[in-house]
């Protein structure tokens, strides 16, 4: 299965000025299509670090979404860093330029002022359409200022969208629907778990290792809690993976927990 990743760019996230909203939403958008997020990275507005992060993304062969830093102010570096990571030049994308000019004209009409495409500030706005050579645009239904996608021969791609959720989320959905529909619901995943009361992870670890050895397609997980207001000290213990492989692993885990004498909650099931 194709892996999906997320890069979230911006000093404002790392400084706490803005709270990230993209991670949870991208997980939701992928899950609705039977897909899952394999990893996420946060990076500040440091050009060298952004370039290195994007170089890894392009080399991975994965499908990666990158949010933020594609504007045209001095603290926006993502477009330039993408070109550096790919080893290509930047150029004004003709379709992006046309869309940006449409937006400028729409704004002028809304404000009741003349449309002046050659005004210095309007010329500066065209910088938002300067993308790495070979990029494809991602339509922006909010204000027409597009994002862009860059693919590599390995089959992976990085899709660049703004940091604003109202723009980014429909653009991510558009990319998924237009380019990855063939991957939807191809490998249904599921998760079965129980709350094991009063347990200690160290005593359950050998059991977890045995389950993974006996059922290599699934992963065993444990989520401990020491002060839950309802359940008190407990561990959520379960198995997750392909819907075809999880049931047998789950039966095995429940049998081992019974032999262990564990006190457990009713079964919890979640389709991923």
Image (cartoon, rainbow, N blue to C red):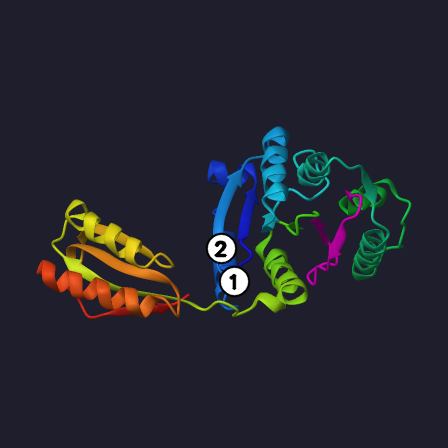
What percent of the width, then of the height, locates residue 121?
82, 42
Q: Is 141 inside the magenta-drawn segment? A: yes
Badge 2: residue crowd in 10 Å (few <14, some 14–19, many ≥20): some
Badge 1: residue crowd in 10 Å (few <14, some 14–19, many ≥20): some
Q: Residue at x 83, y 42 (%)?
A: 91
Please tell me which residue lies in front, 41 or 44: 41
Q: Is residue 33 left or right of residue 230?
A: right
Please tell me which residue lies in front, 246 or 170: 246
| Tag 1 secondary structure | helix
Q: Which residue does the numbered mark 2 point to in the structure image?
A: 37
Q: Is residue 121 left or right of residue 257?
A: right
The alpha-carbon separation of the residues under discs 1 and 2 comes to 7 Å
Q: Residue at x 64, y 31 (%)?
A: 47
What percent of the width, then of the height, locates residue 146?
73, 54
Q: Is 172 inside the magenta-drawn segment? A: no
Q: How many marks?
A: 2
Q: Which residues are magenta?
A: 131-151
What percent of the width, then of the height, locates residue 188?
45, 69
Q: Is residue 18 visible?
A: no
Q: Is residue 105 visible?
A: yes
Location of residue 177 with respect to 210 vertically, above or below: below
Please tell me which residue lies in front, 164 or 3: 3
Q: Quadrant of residue 234?
A: bottom left
What percent of the width, then of the height, locates residue 264?
15, 64
């Amino acid at each position: 299965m194709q892996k999906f990743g997320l890069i979230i760019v911006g000093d404002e996230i790392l400084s706490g000025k803005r709270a990230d909203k993209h991670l949870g939403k991208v997980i939701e958008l992928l899950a609705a299509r039977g897909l899952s997020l394999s990893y996420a990275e946060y990076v500040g507005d440091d050009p060298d670090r952004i370039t290195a992060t994007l170089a890894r993304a392009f080399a991975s062969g994965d499908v990666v979404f990158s949010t933020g830093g594609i504007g045209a102010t001095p603290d926006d570096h993502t477009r330039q860093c993408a070109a550096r990571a790919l080893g290509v030049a930047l150029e004004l994308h003709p379709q992006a330029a046309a869309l940006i000019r449409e937006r400028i004209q729409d704004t002028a009409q809304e404000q009741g002022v003349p449309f002046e495409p050659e005004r210095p500030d309007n010329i500066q706005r065209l910088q938002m359409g300067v993308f790495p050579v070979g990029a494809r645009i991602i339509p922006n239904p909010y204000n027409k200022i597009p994002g862009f996608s860059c693919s590599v021969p390995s089959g992976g791609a990085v899709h660049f969208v703004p940091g604003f959720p109202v723009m980014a989320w429909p653009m991510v959905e558009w990319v998924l629907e237009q380019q990855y529909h063939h991957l939807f619901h191809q490998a249904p995943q599921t998760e079965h778990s129980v709350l094991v009361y009063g347990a200690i992870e160290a005593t359950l670890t050998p059991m977890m290792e045995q389950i993974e050895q006996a059922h290599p397609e699934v992963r065993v997980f444990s989520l401990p809690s020491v002060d839950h207001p309802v359940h008190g000290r407990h561990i959520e213990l379960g198995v997750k993976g392909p819907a075809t492989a999880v049931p047998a692993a789950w039966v095995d885990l429940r049998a081992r927990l019974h032999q262990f004498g564990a006190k457990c909650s009713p079964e919890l099931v979640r389709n991923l």
